[in-house]
Image: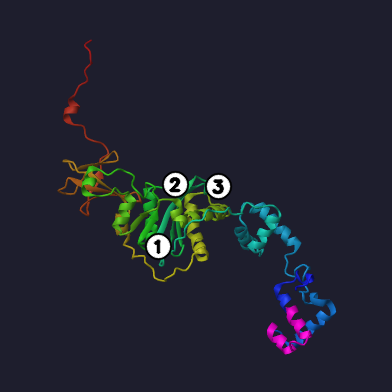
């Protein structure tokens, strides 16, 4: 039966008490006791002396009930908490501890800061319980699947315009690529994917939601119905030409990895940009270029297999001719093409009834037919026909 004064002792200390008692009762030799406890016979004799003088409590740790020798001085603790209240009030303990180390040279663990803040009644960083959802295993190799989404948020906290963060996260490694745009649309999607491919290569599949940028909501035309073709968006058409599978996500939870990324970025990146005084889109994209390398180095994980499934990136010219807006237009008898309310004169000799208008993300435009680039120019003003020029205005009613 365990005595009441042993209840406050740890399991390790109770084990020592048991072995030392057996040694004192000569059921074990000092050498045997030392072997069991991993101690020298000399130290076993010291422990026997302690038990003889103070009883079982003589084996308790001598520092019990005393302040730790490694504790943070009260003066330093007060300074850290004052800095937190002044500059990092809305930061979580982990990010705040990082900033105290990086910017002020004050080393502190996030758990210690969390304990201090909870003792003061500060608990805004506590996580709420989430409903359980089925876990999906990661893809084994980098480039097999990339999750894509846009986050509409006040990224500049009122210092600049509201914008959208277009983010890509690899399913196997959680490596992130992101840029900021004024809106979530086809041109930002094409531009961001161009930059992603230029940096990493062409992934096998992209996982995106049912936003009209990625999935077309238009009903199929008669020609599409007869051909058995499903309507697709410009972004979907471009990915198809690159041989990339576009997988639709039917709920936010389905693409949980990129959704969780946005929660992390809305906490961390916003505060990092605040400290860096970022307030414009250009400054934000320049900031992200440097920040993402640090973020990926810390938070990216090793994939199950080392192989990279990204396919080789095309030449810039080939990539720009695929990742653009393509619209089929009628070529009139006078070799003019109407597009977005503007008339264009085709100068190249071509036998065709329809041509393809390509609008590139850099703002340039091309008119092609069967892959051949056609020469053209914009018609700034239409000539007045002779019959129209001879018309004279007459009053509607006789005077």
Residue 318: where, in percent of width, then height?
29, 59
Tag 3 near tag 2, CB within 8 Å: no
Q: Viewer-proximal residue, 330 or 203?
A: 203
Q: Quadrant of the N terminus?
A: bottom right
- Viewer-side residue, 237 vs 343: 237
Say left or right for 52 vs 327: right
Task: Name the residue tied to disc 1.
Answer: 199
User: Which of the labelled discs sits on residue 157, or is there none?
Assistant: 3
Query: Which numbered disc, 1 or 2, marks the residue that appears first in the sequence?
Result: 2
Q: Is residue 188 magenta?
A: no
Residue 94 lies left or right of residue 335; in this view the side is right
The mark nearer the N terminus, 1 or 3, is 3
Q: Quadrant of the C terminus?
A: top left
Magenta segment, which residues?
16-37
Looking at the image, residue 202 lies above or below residue 344? below
Name above or below for residue 231 compared with residue 79. Answer: above
CB of mark 1 within 8 Å of CB of mark 2?
no
* Residue reaching furthest to the front: 1
Judging depth in this view, the residue of 331 and 247 nearest the camera is: 247
Could you tell me how far apart the alpha carbons at marks 3 and 2 are, in whole angstroms?
Answer: 15 Å
Instruction: Where is residue 272? Give x, y as percent.
Output: 56, 55
Q: Is residue 80 visible?
A: yes
Q: Residues within 10 Å of mark 2 (few under 14, many from 20)?
A: few
Q: Is residue 320 visible?
A: no
Q: Secondary structure at mark 3?
A: loop
């Amino acid at each position: 039966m365990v005595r009441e004064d042993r209840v406050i002792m740890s399991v390790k200390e109770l084990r020592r008490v048991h072995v030392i008692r057996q040694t004192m009762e000569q059921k074990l030799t000092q050498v045997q006791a030392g072997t069991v406890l991993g101690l020298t016979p000399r130290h076993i004799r010291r422990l026997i002396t302690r038990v003889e003088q103070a009883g079982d409590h003589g084996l308790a740790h001598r520092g019990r009930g005393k302040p730790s020798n490694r504790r943070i001085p009260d003066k330093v603790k007060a300074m850290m908490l004052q800095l937190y209240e002044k500059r990092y009030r809305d930061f979580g303990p982990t990010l705040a501890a990082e900033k105290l180390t990086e910017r002020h040279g004050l080393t502190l663990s996030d758990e210690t800061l969390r304990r201090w803040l909870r003792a003061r009644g500060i608990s805004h960083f506590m996580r709420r319980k989430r409903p359980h959802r089925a876990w999906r295993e990661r893809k084994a190799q980098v480039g097999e699947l990339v999750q894509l989404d846009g986050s509409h948020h006040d990224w500049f906290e009122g210092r600049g315009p509201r914008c959208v963060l277009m983010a890509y996260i690899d399913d196997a490694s959680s490596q992130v690529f992101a840029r900021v745009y004024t809106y979530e649309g086809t041109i930002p999607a094409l531009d961001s994917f161009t930059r992603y491919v230029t940096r990493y290569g062409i992934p096998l599949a992209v996982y995106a939601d049912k936003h009209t940028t990625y999935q077309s909501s238009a009903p199929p035309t008669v020609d599409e119905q007869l051909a058995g073709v499903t309507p697709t968006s410009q972004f979907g058409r471009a990915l198809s030409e690159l041989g990339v599978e576009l997988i639709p996500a039917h709920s936010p939870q389905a693409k949980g990895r990129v959704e969780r990324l946005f929660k992390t970025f809305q906490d961390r990146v916003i505060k990092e940009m605040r400290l860096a005084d970022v307030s414009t889109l250009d400054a934000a994209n320049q900031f992200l270029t440097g920040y993402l390398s640090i973020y990926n180095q810390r938070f990216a994980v090793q994939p199950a297999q080392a192989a990279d499934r990204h396919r080789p990136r095309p030449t810039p010219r080939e990539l720009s001719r695929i990742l653009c807006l393509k619209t089929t237009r009628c070529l009139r008898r006078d070799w003019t093409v109407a597009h977005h309310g503007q008339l264009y004169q085709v100068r190249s000799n071509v036998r065709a009834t329809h041509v393809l208008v390509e609008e590139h993300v850099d703002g340039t435009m091309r008119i092609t037919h069967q892959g051949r680039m056609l020469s053209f120019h914009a018609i700034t003003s239409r000539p007045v026909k002779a019959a129209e020029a001879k018309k004279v205005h007459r009053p509607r009613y006789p005077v």
